[in-house]
Image (spheres, rainbow, N blue to C red):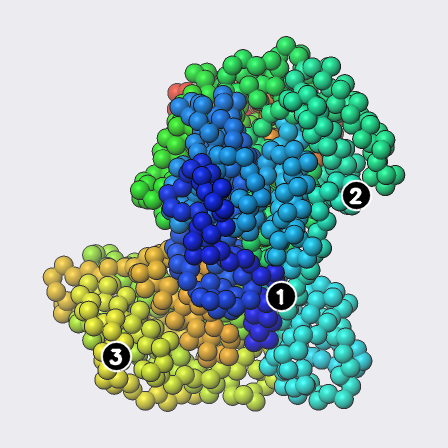
């Protein structure tokens, strides 16, 4: 690990040096150019900065500008979990220029301002027009005639007060790029683009150049980060590690690891070794290359024949290697593009065609002075002719085999449109590339990426007259899809669940697309959550003054401002079985589609179940850091969301967490468990006892088990020997907890299992992955020890309602108070049972007469209660990770790091501890934007109707690599019985108020022997239960009402049951749910 840190610091000096600007903003502007500054709108002077700094400069340390403001970890915690502090600091020092504030430019700008670059300069010479309202969500009708950059500036600045946003409204010159680290062009001719690109490449260091464009349902990106660009970390993943079990004395050597977890090393990786006993020659922090990687072993390319013999222990850790990329210029790339980054393997030849089409479009625009007219056959033929000429002049390696007239006609017809879903998708991709250029984190797009979504077009032939403008905000979209689909979008009835990061993006997209933007349409959004500070770095419809307000209502209000025609209803209900009276049958039956914007699997499974039941399309998506995925669930065409699930996360055995941790995750899991037990669960138990002592005692006696005994012991301990009356008591409690956790328990463990202990099989007890611990000696001069005492004593005081004195946060005074605490001498005991069985998931074992002990404890509690003040109640503390002032993470990090120190495990800072203990899901705006853009491209298909399954796309993407993988959805599994076929989408219906016997006969006619009928979680009938025969002649609905307590409101005409059947051979047959329409 030390070598890894040293190598990282060394790599910082290998990146290109970032230019420094002078102290005066006018330093780089000639006298003749100073008058041009009047067209730069900014709240301050034009920014000076240093970014991607590698060599040491004034005011910098280890390549990082130490004069930068500190990172607001409450605001950026989810982004920090993806990028880390070093990347964030580089972003904070980066100046970016975006030329072209069309819909794509606006999306890129939004993502970068949320990410927190130092400054964004918006360049545009065009004025706001009607068609801009379908793709740029910053613009309104009030902005017509205003420069697009200027109109966007204020609203962009509101997204992040720390980012300087300026507007440049004159023709762009090379001088304007001088202080930039990255420049992005979204609407520029190739000749001008090549000129700027050559200028950027000549700078020292080069200015990263990105050219991106969206043309209807086609789009492309080109990246050039200079002749040499160093990538520090190609994938952004944590360095992989393994616990060594053995190393051979061979050439090359075989390294085997414990089978606790599969190794994730790859051939060619470099690793370092540490903590090895015996073969200590490998503990030299030297990166070594490995090959032939397997699940639990690999080959080390080194001769270890003369090394010491391996004894035990050892950790192997991956060392990330830098990668130098040599980018081509745009001029060279256009001539010889090389390979294209593929996204859809059913369209292997498509990128080269789009490459040619975009070059031809540039020539068409330069010759004609406009885009091709939508539906114009003449313009399409002219574009095809230009493309054919260019293709004939190309080299054999780059020539396109066939120019498809239909594809080029579709391209020409929509080339003048910026579609919001395409802008959102490419805005996410380009935004991430800017982050890479600024930081060297993640592998850049190298160098061309092209994409199209022609499958989104309606399956019917588009009439050119249907593509003509209507003088509405949707004209750009109409020019691609026609007026007929536009009306369908506006009249759509959608249900969106969730209005967080995904939800904000979706609402913005829907408003721009015109979804549910008529009196016939309706968009219902529900979310039971409220806005928190950490949301603001991604959920861009919220502002800091919205903190504490309901997400759904604030997001809906913001979406209405984007498009006043949006017909939206916002609710604060959770979508779950308990709210089916709100989201009832008539609500579901009215829907055209459902969009999930959720962050947990359970809610997704519920929505999936409801969509299957009501036969509604479900558009599903999710993100995890730089990764995102989308899934289309289409009735009777695709499998449902619940048809395939990720394997459950592996849980560490209880004994590992409690006594034998071997990584920081184990320590943090234990720390959070202890935090909740001490400060939330035990105070809650105390309050339960004090509120209703008799009922509480009766419940404990009835339980009469080890769990009840343990609960009572904790309550008795809290109200007796650990009772706190004043703050000094809380300090004493914290100090004694330190001694118990980090000294006494370790002494007992090592007394019970000494270093040389053996198992029943004769193997060493303390063999990998177990780590032999050492007890800690408390020292008030150790800041980490004292910080733990401070956090623990303050939180303990809160639970008892004890005022916290000012000196509690003074380390000198606190140290004196801690040193005055008397700590009893601890002597290990014989015969103490410590669980070592990894299969044991319960830490509680009965070892005494529980019933008798429970009675003793209850008697003791009665005596304790008499000594308490009248009305005494404790104040339980619920863990809140996103408030750095509440000492919650201070205590958890302190608990985990002291435990890590016991076991020789690398400690982590509070931020890293927050990620793990707080179970923070890494999240950034770029992957969220991309996911929602892709989903909205699928929404066109869903609402148009009649698309085949092969037209839909599921996507997995990782912007860090970058990787884009799109494929057709999977068809639903088909079940068979005799001549019948059905899938998960089918439901059998019977009309009539049937009895159970009549239902059994109905199934018998289909060759099915029903032996069990259930409704919800209740069993209505089972042939094995004799008393159930009494129900045979009763109506199914009546039995459901009585047994399953099913409520059948007047509007409901049916009841649903699940029937278990087998065939005449005794084979189980999984049949669809059965709906009995009894009225």
Q: Give the residue at the far right of this rendering.
A: 396
Whether the residues at callouts 1 and 2 have beta carbons within 8 Å, the answer is: no
Kindly state the secondary structure of the residue where label 1 is placed: loop
Q: Is residue 654 above or below residue 189?
A: below
Say if mark 2 contacts mark 3, CB within 8 Å.
no
**Residue 669 falls left or right of residue 290:** left
Residue furthest out toward the left: 870
Dot 1 or dot 2: first in sequence order is: 1
Would you say residue 1010 is visible in this rendering? Answer: no
Which residue is label 1 attached to? 14
- Tell which of 892 and 416 is nearer to you: 416
What x and y, as percent, mark residue 668?
A: 45, 67
Tell me the crowding category of disc 3: few under 14, some 14 to 19, or many 20 or more residues within 10 angstroms, Cα based: few
Which residue is tagged 3?
Answer: 812
Q: Are marks 1 and 3 in contact (CB under 8 Å)?
A: no
How far is disc 1 from disc 3 in space, using C-alphas?
Answer: 44 Å
Of 296 and 232, the residue lying toward us: 232
Which image quadrant is residue 263 in? Answer: bottom right
Query: How far is disc 1 from disc 2 in space, using C-alphas?
Result: 29 Å
Q: Position of residue 795 (x, y in %)?
A: 28, 66
Image point (67%, 46%), residue name: 198
Whole-percent x, y for residue 1029 in the image: 52, 34
Quadrant (top left/top right/bottom left/bottom right) for the N terminus: bottom right
Q: Looking at the image, is mark 1 or mark 3 nearer the viewer?
A: 1
Q: Earlier in the sequence, mark 2 or mark 3?
A: 2
């Amino acid at each position: 690990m030390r070598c890894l840190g040293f190598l990282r610091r060394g790599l910082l000096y290998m990146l290109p040096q970032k230019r420094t600007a002078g102290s005066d903003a006018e330093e780089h502007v000639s006298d003749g150019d100073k008058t041009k500054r009047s067209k730069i709108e900014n709240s301050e002077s034009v920014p000076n900065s240093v970014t991607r700094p590698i060599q040491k400069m004034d005011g910098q340390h280890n390549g990082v500008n130490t004069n930068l403001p500190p990172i607001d970890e409450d605001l950026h915690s989810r982004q920090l979990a993806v990028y880390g502090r070093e990347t964030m600091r580089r972003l904070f020092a980066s100046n970016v220029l975006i030329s072209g504030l069309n819909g794509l430019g606006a999306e890129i700008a939004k993502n970068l301002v949320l990410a927190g670059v130092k400054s964004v300069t918006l360049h545009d010479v065009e004025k706001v027009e009607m068609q801009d309202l379908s793709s740029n969500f910053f613009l309104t009708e009030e902005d017509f005639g205003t420069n697009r950059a200027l109109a966007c500036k204020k609203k962009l600045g509101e997204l992040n007060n720390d980012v300087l946003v300026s507007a440049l409204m004159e023709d762009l010159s090379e001088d304007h790029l001088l202080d930039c680290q990255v420049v992005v062009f979204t609407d520029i001719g190739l000749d001008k683009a090549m000129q700027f690109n050559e200028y950027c490449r000549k700078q020292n260091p080069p200015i990263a150049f990105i050219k991106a464009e969206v043309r209807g349902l086609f789009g492309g990106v080109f990246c050039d980060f200079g002749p040499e660009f160093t990538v520090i970390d190609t994938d952004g993943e944590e360095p992989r590690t393994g616990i060594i079990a053995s190393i051979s004395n061979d050439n090359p050597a075989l390294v085997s690891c414990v089978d606790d977890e599969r190794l994730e090393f790859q051939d060619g990786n470099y690793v370092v070794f540490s903590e090895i006993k015996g073969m200590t020659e490998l503990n030299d922090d030297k990166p070594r290359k490995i090959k032939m990687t397997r699940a639990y072993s690999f080959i080390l390319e080194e001769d270890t024949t003369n090394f010491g013999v391996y004894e035990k222990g050892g950790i192997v850790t991956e060392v990330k290697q830098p990668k130098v990329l040599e980018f081509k210029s745009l001029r060279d790339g256009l001539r010889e593009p090389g390979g294209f980054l593929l996204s859809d393997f059913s369209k292997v030849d498509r990128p080269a065609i789009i490459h040619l089409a975009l070059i031809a479009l540039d020539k068409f625009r330069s010759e004609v002075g406009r885009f091709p007219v939508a539906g114009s056959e003449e313009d399409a033929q002219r574009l095809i002719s230009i493309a054919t000429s260019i293709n004939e002049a190309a080299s054999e390696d780059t020539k396109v085999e066939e120019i498809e007239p239909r594809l080029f006609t579709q391209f020409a017809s929509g080339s003048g449109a910026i579609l919001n879903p395409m802008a959102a998708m490419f805005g996410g991709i380009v935004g991430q590339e800017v982050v890479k250029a600024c930081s060297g984190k993640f592998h850049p797009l190298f160098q061309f990426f092209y994409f199209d979504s022609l499958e989104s077009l309606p399956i019917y032939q588009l009439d050119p007259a249907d593509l003509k403008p209507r003088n509405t905000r949707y004209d750009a979209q109409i020019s691609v899809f026609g007026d007929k689909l536009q009306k369908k979008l506006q009249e759509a009835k959608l249900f969106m669940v969730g209005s967080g990061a995904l939800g904000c993006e979706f609402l913005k997209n829907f408003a721009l697309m015109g979804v549910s933007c008529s009196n016939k349409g309706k968009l219902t959004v529900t979310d039971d959550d409220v806005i928190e500070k950490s949301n603001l770095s991604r959920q861009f419809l919220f502002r800091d003054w919205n903190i504490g307000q309901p997400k759904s209502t604030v997001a809906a209000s913001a979406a209405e401002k984007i498009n006043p025609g949006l017909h939206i209803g916002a609710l604060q209900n959770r979508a779950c079985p308990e709210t089916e009276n709100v989201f009832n049958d008539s609500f579901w039956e009215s829907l055209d589609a459902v969009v999930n914007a959720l962050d947990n699997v359970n809610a997704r499974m519920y929505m999936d179940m409801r969509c299957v039941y009501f036969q509604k399309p479900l558009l599903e998506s999710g993100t995890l850091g730089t990764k995102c995925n989308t899934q289309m669930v289409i009735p009777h065409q695709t499998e449902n969301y619940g048809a395939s699930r990720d394997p459950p996360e592996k849980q560490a055995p209880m004994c590992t967490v409690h006594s034998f941790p071997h990584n920081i995750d184990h320590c943090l899991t234990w720390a959070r468990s202890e935090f909740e037990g001490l400060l939330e669960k035990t105070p809650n138990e105390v309050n339960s006892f004090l509120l209703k002592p008799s009922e509480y005692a009766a419940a404990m006696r009835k339980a009469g088990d080890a769990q009840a005994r343990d609960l009572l012991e904790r309550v008795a301990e809290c109200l007796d020997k650990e009772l706190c009356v004043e703050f000094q008591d809380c300090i004493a409690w914290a100090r004694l907890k330190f001694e118990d956790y980090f000294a006494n328990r370790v002494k007992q463990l090592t007394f019970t299992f000494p270093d040389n202990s053996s198992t029943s099989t004769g193997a060493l007890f303390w063999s990998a992955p177990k780590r032999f611990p050492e007890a800690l000696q408390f020292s008030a001069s150790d800041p980490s020890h004292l910080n733990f005492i401070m956090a623990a004593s303050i939180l303990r005081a809160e639970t008892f309602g004890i005022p916290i004195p000012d000196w509690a946060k003074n380390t000198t005074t606190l140290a004196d108070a801690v040193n005055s605490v008397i700590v009893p001498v601890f002597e290990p005991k014989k015969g103490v049972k410590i669980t070592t069985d990894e299969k044991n998931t319960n830490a509680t074992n009965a070892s005494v007469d529980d019933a008798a002990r429970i009675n003793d404890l209850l008697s003791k509690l009665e005596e304790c209660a008499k000594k308490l003040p009248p009305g005494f109640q404790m104040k339980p503390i619920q863990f809140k990770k996103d408030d750095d002032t509440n000492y919650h993470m201070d205590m958890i990090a302190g608990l985990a790091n002291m435990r890590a120190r016991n076991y020789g495990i690398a400690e982590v800072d509070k931020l890293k501890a927050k990620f793990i203990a707080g179970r923070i899901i890494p999240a950034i705006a770029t992957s969220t934007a991309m996911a929602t853009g892709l989903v909205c491209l699928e929404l066109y298909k869903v609402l148009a109707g009649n698309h085949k399954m092969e037209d839909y796309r599921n996507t997995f993407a990782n912007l860090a690599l970058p990787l884009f993988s799109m494929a057709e959805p999977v068809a639903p599994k088909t079940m068979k019985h005799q001549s019948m076929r059905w899938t998960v989408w089918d439901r059998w219906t019977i009309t009539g108020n049937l009895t159970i016997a009549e239902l059994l006969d109905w199934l018998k006619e289909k060759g099915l022997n029903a032996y069990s009928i259930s409704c919800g979680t209740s069993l209505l009938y089972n042939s094995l239960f004799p008393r159930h025969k009494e129900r045979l002649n009763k109506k199914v609905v009546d039995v459901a009402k009585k047994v399953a307590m099913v409520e059948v409101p007047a509007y409901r005409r049916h009841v649903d049951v699940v029937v278990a059947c087998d065939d005449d051979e005794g084979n189980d047959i999984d049949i669809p749910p059965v709906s009995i329409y009894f009225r």
